[in-house]
């Protein structure tokens, strides 16, 4: 049985215009969250994964994936949407490239988990956000290992380990926000 993400419940995906507006709003949110960063080398810590989790939890798989593709396209053509206002294809091929590409899969998988039943209650929403957030490190670390002089252990140490606690916290915050929104919607409908 397919479950409805929050935006579907609100009726926000009923028209093409609304979907386009959601994609634009979501890609702007991800771009803005990239500007809130802690400079670390070679991968900065940002709020992007929180924004991506929120998009996945509320948009569903397809629309969330399209939103992140739009974000990457904006950055590729030169909009300063990446961490620190960076942009361009050269930046995308740098140390963070695996994470940038992984963002699309993260958004899509988060939405898919919601559509497959992890759509209500803090615990389920937390898992729907956390599992893709953890899997994001697979392409991120592999890319880092491939294009830098780091060995696999070094790539894990630089590209995954410093971000684990933040990933758990951001997944919990995303789940709390969506749980609160669902509760507000339910009380409003009563």
Image (cartoon, grey):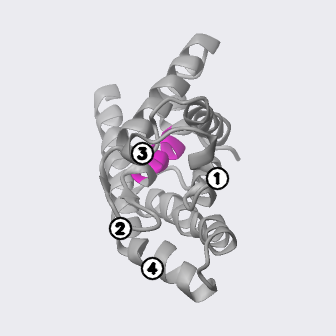
Instruction: Identify residue for label 4.
Output: 161
Q: Tell me the residue at 45%/37% (across/down).
A: 81
- Against 81, is 179 above or below? below
Stretch of the chain drawn in magenta: 50-58
Q: Confirm or deny contact between disc 3 and disc 2 (CB under 8 A).
A: no
Instruction: Identify residue for label 3.
Output: 51
Q: CA distance from mark 3 to mark 4?
A: 20 Å
Instruction: Identify residue for label 2.
Output: 166
Which mark is nearer the camera, 1 or 2?
Answer: 1
Within 10 Å of disc 1 (Cα), the crowding (few <14, some 14-19, many 20+) is: few
Q: Earlier in the sequence, mark 1 or mark 2?
A: 1
Q: Tell me the residue at 29%/36% (across/down).
A: 184
Q: CA distance from mark 2 to mark 4?
A: 10 Å
Q: CA distance from mark 3 to mark 2?
A: 13 Å
- Against 93, is 62 above or below? above
Q: Nearer the viewer, residue 163 or 43?
A: 43
Q: Earlier in the sequence, mark 2 or mark 4?
A: 4
């Amino acid at each position: 049985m397919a479950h409805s993400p929050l935006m579907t419940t609100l009726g926000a995906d009923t028209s093409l215009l609304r979907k386009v507006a959601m994609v634009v709003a979501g890609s702007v949110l991800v771009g803005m969250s990239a500007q809130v960063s802690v400079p670390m080398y070679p991968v900065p810590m940002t709020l992007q994964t929180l924004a991506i989790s929120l998009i996945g939890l509320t948009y569903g798989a397809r629309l969330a994936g399209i939103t992140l593709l739009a974000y990457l396209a904006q950055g590729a053509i030169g909009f300063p949407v990446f961490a620190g206002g960076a942009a361009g294809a050269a930046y995308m091929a740098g140390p963070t490239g695996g994470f940038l590409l992984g963002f699309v899969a993260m958004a899509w998988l988060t939405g898919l988990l919601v559509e497959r039943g992890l759509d209500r209650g803090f615990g389920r929403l937390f898992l729907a956000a956390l599992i893709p957030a953890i899997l994001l490190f697979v392409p991120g670390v592999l890319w880092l290992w491939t294009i830098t002089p780091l060995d696999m252990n070094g790539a894990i140490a630089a590209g995954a380990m410093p971000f684990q606690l933040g990933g758990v916290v951001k997944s919990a915050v995303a789940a709390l926000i969506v749980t609160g929104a669902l509760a507000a919607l339910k009380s409003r409908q009563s």
